[in-house]
């Protein structure tokens, strides 16, 4: 018994349209959009009175299905984490996506107003670059040698 593969990551956002746009620039496409509310979601999520837009984005050319799920709370007001962009804090750190041409992708993202952080870095047989994603989360791109 073991994990088979990565399935999804969920990003809670205040600006749903901006998050959709960011991930679309990376190649993700919308698969589903629903509202989750009441039971059994409140019990499952541990959030009383939950009402949220839940948008599933998929990477259509991935060899295994890869999802980004966006969660936009209508109720309750989501808790903010002012330290979310810090890479020296405990817990979730960042998510990284492999790309074929990192320099072209960086140019594409910059041209569309996406904040890039730092410089291209060579590390362990790949080139890496950090971006600021929705709600200030850290997203990394990697191009393997």
Image (cartoon, grey):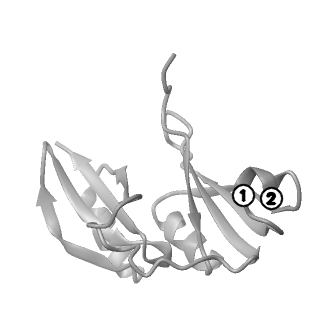
Residue 53 percent across, percent down from the top left: 75, 67
Is residue 15 left or right of 96 when viewed as pictured? Answer: right
Measured as percent of width and height from the top left, residue 132 is found at 37, 74
List the residue tagged with mark 1: 46
Which residue is pictured at 56% across the width and 46% down the height? 60
Callout 1–callout 2 Cβ contact below 8 Å = yes
In front of the other: 87 or 35: 87
Q: Alpha-carbon distance for marks 1 and 2?
A: 6 Å
Considering every residue shown, the one lying at the far top of the view is 1
Q: Which type of secondary structure does the marked residue at label 2 adopt? A: helix
In percent of the image, x 24 and y 50: which residue is there? 143
Quadrant position of the C terminus in the picture:
top left
Q: Which residue is mark 2?
A: 42
Q: Is residue 134 above or below residue 98?
A: below
- Residue 108 placement: quadrant: bottom left
The one of 64 and 133 positioned closer to us in this rendering: 133
Determine whether, in the image, residue 37 is placed left or right of residue 54: right
Query: Quick check: 127 above or below 104?
Result: above
Splitting the image into 4 quarters, where does residue 46 fall?
Answer: bottom right
- Identify which residue is drawn at 62% across, 80% down: 14
């Amino acid at each position: 018994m073991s994990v088979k593969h990565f399935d999804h990551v969920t990003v809670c956002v205040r600006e749903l349209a901006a998050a959709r746009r960011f991930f679309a620039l990376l190649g993700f496409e919308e698969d589903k959009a629903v509202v989750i509310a009441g039971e059994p979601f409140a019990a499952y999520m541990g959030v009383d009175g939950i009402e949220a837009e839940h948008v599933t984005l998929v990477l259509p050319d991935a060899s295994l299905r890869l999802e980004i799920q966006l969660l936009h709370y209508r109720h309750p007001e989501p808790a903010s984490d002012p330290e979310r962009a810090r890479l020296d804090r405990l817990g979730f750190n960042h998510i990284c996506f492999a790309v074929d041409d990192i320099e072209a992708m960086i140019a594409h993202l910059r041209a569309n107003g996406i904040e890039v952080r730092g410089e291209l870095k060579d590390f362990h047989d790949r080139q890496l670059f950090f971006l600021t994603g929705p709600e200030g989360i850290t997203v990394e791109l990697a191009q393997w040698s």
